[in-house]
Image (cartoon, rainbow, N blue to C red):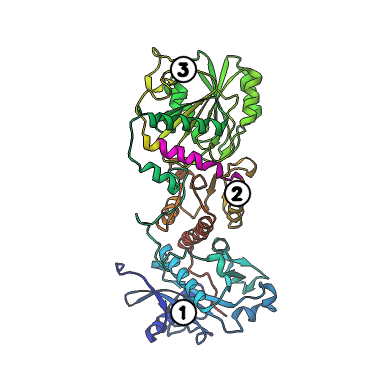
Amino acid sequence: MRSTAALAYQIATEEWHFEAIHRLNYKTFVEEILQHEENRAKRLVDKFHEDNTYIICLRGGQLLGMVAVRAKRPFSLDEKLHGLDAHLPAGRSLCEIRLLAVEPSERSGVLFLGLMRALHEHCRREGYDLAVISGTVRQLKLYKHLGFVPFGPLVGTDAAKFQPMYITLEAIEFRPDQKIYPLRKSTVTESPANFLPGPVAIRETVRHRFAERPVSHRSESFVADFKATQGLLLAMVNANHVQILMGSGTLANDTIAAQLSLVSATGLILSNGEFGERLVDHAKRFGLSYEVVRTEWGHVCRQDQIREAVARNPAIRWLWAVHCETSTGVLNDLSMLKEICAENQLALNMDCISSIGTVPVNLTGVYLASGVSGKGLAAFPGLSMIFHERALAPASNRLPRYLDLGYYAINDGIPFTLSSNLLSALRTALECHPNRDFATITKLTAWLRAELRDMGIQIVGNESFLSPAVTTLTLPPDVNSRILGKKLEDAGYLLSYMSGYLLERNWVQVCLMGEVSEPELRSLLKELRLAIAAQLFNSASSSLLFAQAS
């Protein structure tokens, strides 16, 4: 039975440490890897033992894992690859990493990450800023996730081939507030780095406004705040009218479906992801007459399909689509949809919940559009909004009053109780929003996606039609999205991974919708490397990553 004692990481100093190292060395590189001849003593002393510094993992009095580092030349790679320094960045302080070995029963991501963190801390203390390894060709995918760069030809024997590689200290830097080995648990006193599509990270000034004393929605101060907020929203998206509701984006889209139920005509719904399918569900629940054009997830709604559907059925009088399909990050072409609807005299309706505030949005020519106070507007969730192009009359005999936009309009937008705290926070967020630089978000996202691709991670969708606010990662088969998301959450990074459609596809998402800093994003990427590498290490058939010298 496995001991419940905590894992401890340290430099090997005692005689029993070294004896356990020699025996784990034998078990790994003789019995498992078959790299050396067997012997009766069942112990293997490394040829560079006197120069090695061993970083070890202990539980009680048992050695569970180790990795060796040495800075004395020649390295084992010097003996295998002529002119080693010519392959490496100049001006670096070098060391060689070797002999990573872990007991088979203990090959978990936690132990592996602990060794990597302790190794990083040792190299930082000693002033090493570049490490070389001989990496088994069987684990090249794992090395890439860790940030290693291959160089030179393969070395070793036909039975055990290795790729020379190096890594810089900065490529695997850790957050300064993190411990060396256990993943840091987020607490209520710490602010995790938020890369969710909602709720998003919120400015201090917005949080302060939310915490103020609530006031009546019938008070003069509330009405003034409400009108100012409406004006800011209309100016942001170039719309004529907006109604603000207490509720989520689902309520906003239900309200659009309710309004469309007043139109005695067939519609066309576009779906290229989870939220397009949800529009279909809204329409179905309201008994609307509609057709559906479906496009593969990760692709834009195609113009030829839309035009063919409209031409095929002259009864179609309205179209409903998602602008930013949050499930994939695909940004459907609003201008193209406006053009088709104008040509065919269709009422265009848009779900803009994940696009308003993250990309420029112009709702000129859009009949109805939904939005929310969270996500790209970076306020608290709880308010939704419907933008409409023209004045709407009440439908008292046909719609529930809460879903009747005309009823809101004849009551100056405030027919029911509305939270003054949520409204004040939204107004403050909108006043801050003009300072948000869409170009900076786009540049930061382009950097992130390039780094992810360098790690071998596939990104859903084509860069040319993706929102800069949503990056969806297709994980390798050996990496579980639920486990990865939880590991990152424990380390202080919030990613989207728990939605059913993400779990089903083994996807995780990095979203830049709220207040996100560049250092936080860089730190996330480094932690992501390690978390993925830890799972790949778990699934590896062997513990050998860094080669034993022949």
Question: Which residues fall within the magenta stretch?
Answer: 423-438
Residue occupied by mark 1: 54
Q: Which percent across, then down, holds residue 230?
A: 48, 30
Q: Nearer the viewer, residue 252 or 491?
A: 252
Q: Label 2 crowding class (10 Å Cα cut-off): few <14, some 14-19, many 20+?
A: few
Residue type of the residue flagged with mark 1: Tyr
* Residue highlighted by disc 2: 440
Per the image, label 2 sits on a secondary structure element best described as helix
Residue 56 placement (x, y as % from top left): 42, 76
Q: How far apart in space, not on screen, are marks 1 and 2 (Cα)?
A: 44 Å
* Front position in the image: 111 or 204: 204
Disc 2 versus disc 3: nearer the observer: 2
Distance, label 2 to label 3, CA atoms, is: 41 Å
Report the quarter where the C terminus lies: bottom right
Measure how far apart labels 1 and 3 are at the Cα level.
Answer: 71 Å
Task: Look at the picture and state if 384 lies above or below 140.
Answer: above
Q: Residues within 10 Å of mark 3 (few under 14, many from 20)?
A: some
Give residue 408's position: percent from left, percent from top: 42, 21
Q: Amino acid at mark 2?
A: Thr
Q: Is residue 109 left or right of residue 349?
A: left
Q: Was residue 424 drawn as part of the magenta stretch in this picture?
A: yes
Left or right relative to 127: residue 191 = left
Is residue 32 at all visible to an observer of this figure?
no
Per the image, the residue denoted by label 3 is 261
Q: Is residue 545 visible?
A: yes
The first of marks 1 and 3 along the sequence is: 1
The residue positioned 69% from the left and 79% from the top of the image is 82
Mark 1 residue element: strand
